[in-house]
């Protein structure tokens, strides 16, 4: 995970974001009657993507899973086992339980009341690490510091289970002063990294920066295993362009990865489009 060439595929849409993801895939909300049916359809879409011959460890280093996806099967095998044994892709799992209301221009994570049980199940299944998301809407120094403090506190609990935490304090691409928010976030993260014990590392998942090379101090920090970027609403072409200008920053895309994939495509059409997306993201990640 630390040195491989490639990127992370984010397949971790949860309850709030699943309807939109299904709609983009061509399945409207009136196609399912309840949450269980919705998640069944979402898993079918994810399984189709994971089983695609284009979806392999040759260009995809890791995949971030939703908790339910971790607990389900792909091709008759545990999703985690299938990813690692059949595809040689490192499995992560999303552990946050959504976002709290906006305060001081940011949204902290809701209390992670199910964290310990989820971490124990993840370890038992062979998951390598976790991911948790906060959201920054404004360049508010106090709010950004609060987000980073919370992320690192939870990361410490995750590290005690010998899992690798991905810290994701997303900066909205609609933030009125995004360059300032990006820099405030980087400075707050650097301060917390210096406090980590010698035997601990984290990964960072950050919004593509407006300033090329901004994250270089984080990428080079000895307490950081890898820095990855989220697409955050940019198109695939926009995301790839920004990513390619940031040396050693690699992708962890969700919407950009699945752009143009629909339920009514033939398997050949689906695989060809997915391969084109993967090739574009991989090229930008290794430039």
Image (cartoon, grey):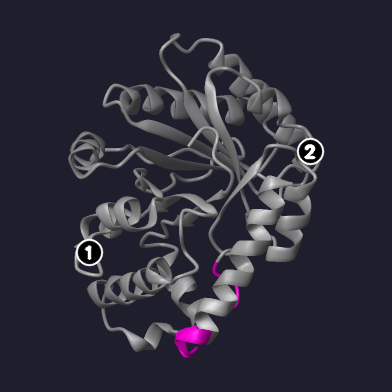
Give the vertical position of 233 relative to 149 (above or below). below
The residue lying at 43 percent from left, 84 percent from top is 27
Residue 235 in sight from this viewpoint: no
The residue lying at 74 percent from left, 64 percent from top is 237
Residue 193 locus on image (x, y percent): 55, 17
Cα–Cα gap, marks 1 and 2: 42 Å
The residue lying at 49 percent from left, 23 percent from top is 149
Query: Which of the two labelled residues, at mark 1 and mark 2, occupies the earlier sequence position?
Result: 1
Q: Which residue is mark 2?
A: 179
Residue 40 locus on image (x, y percent): 27, 74
Question: Secondary structure beneath disc 1?
Answer: strand
- The stretch in magenta equals 258-268
Give the vertical position of 129 relative to 10 (above or below). above
Question: Secondary structure beneath disc 2?
Answer: helix
Magenta-colored stretch includes residue 248: no
Q: How many marks?
A: 2
Q: Is residue 261 left or right of residue 97?
A: right
Residue 272 locus on image (x, y percent): 57, 78
Give the vertical position of 194 relative to 272 (above or below). above
Judging depth in this view, the residue of 286 and 161 nearest the camera is 286
Residue 89 locus on image (x, y percent): 41, 50
10 Å crowding of disc 2: few (<14), some (14-19), many (20+):
some
Q: Which residue is mark 1?
A: 73
10 Å crowding of disc 1: few (<14), some (14-19), many (20+):
some
Name which quarter of the figure residue 77 lies in.
bottom left
């Amino acid at each position: 995970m630390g040195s491989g060439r490639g990127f992370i595929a984010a397949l971790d849409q949860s309850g709030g974001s699943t309807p939109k993801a299904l709609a983009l895939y061509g399945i409207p909300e009136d196609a399912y009657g309840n949450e269980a049916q919705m998640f069944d359809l979402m898993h079918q879409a994810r399984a189709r993507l994971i089983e695609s011959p284009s979806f392999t460890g040759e260009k995809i280093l890791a995949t971030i899973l939703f908790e339910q996806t971790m607990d389900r099967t792909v091709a008759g095998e545990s999703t985690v086992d299938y990813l690692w044994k059949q595809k040689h892709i490192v499995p992560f799992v999303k552990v946050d339980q959504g976002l709290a209301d906006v305060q001081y221009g940011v949204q902290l994570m809701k209390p992670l009341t199910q964290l310990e049980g989820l971490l124990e199940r993840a370890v038992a299944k062979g998951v390598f690490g976790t991911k948790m998301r906060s959201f920054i809407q404004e360049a508010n120094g106090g709010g950004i510091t609060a987000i980073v403090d919370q992320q690192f506190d939870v990361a410490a609990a995750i590290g005690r289970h010998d899992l690798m935490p991905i810290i994701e304090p997303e900066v909205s691409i609609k933030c009125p002063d995004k360059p300032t928010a990006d820099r405030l976030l980087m400075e707050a993260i650097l301060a917390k990294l210096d406090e980590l014990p010698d035997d601990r590392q984290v990964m960072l998942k950050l919004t593509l920066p407006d300033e090329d090379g901004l994250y270089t101090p984080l990428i080079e920090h000895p307490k950081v295993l890898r820095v990855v970027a989220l697409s955050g609403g940019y198109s695939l072409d926009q995301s790839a362009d920004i990513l390619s200008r940031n040396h050693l920053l690699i992708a962890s895309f969700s919407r950009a990865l699945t752009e143009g994939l629909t339920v009514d495509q033939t398997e050949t059409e689906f695989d060809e489009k997915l391969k084109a997306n993967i090739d574009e993201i991989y090229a930008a990640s290794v430039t």
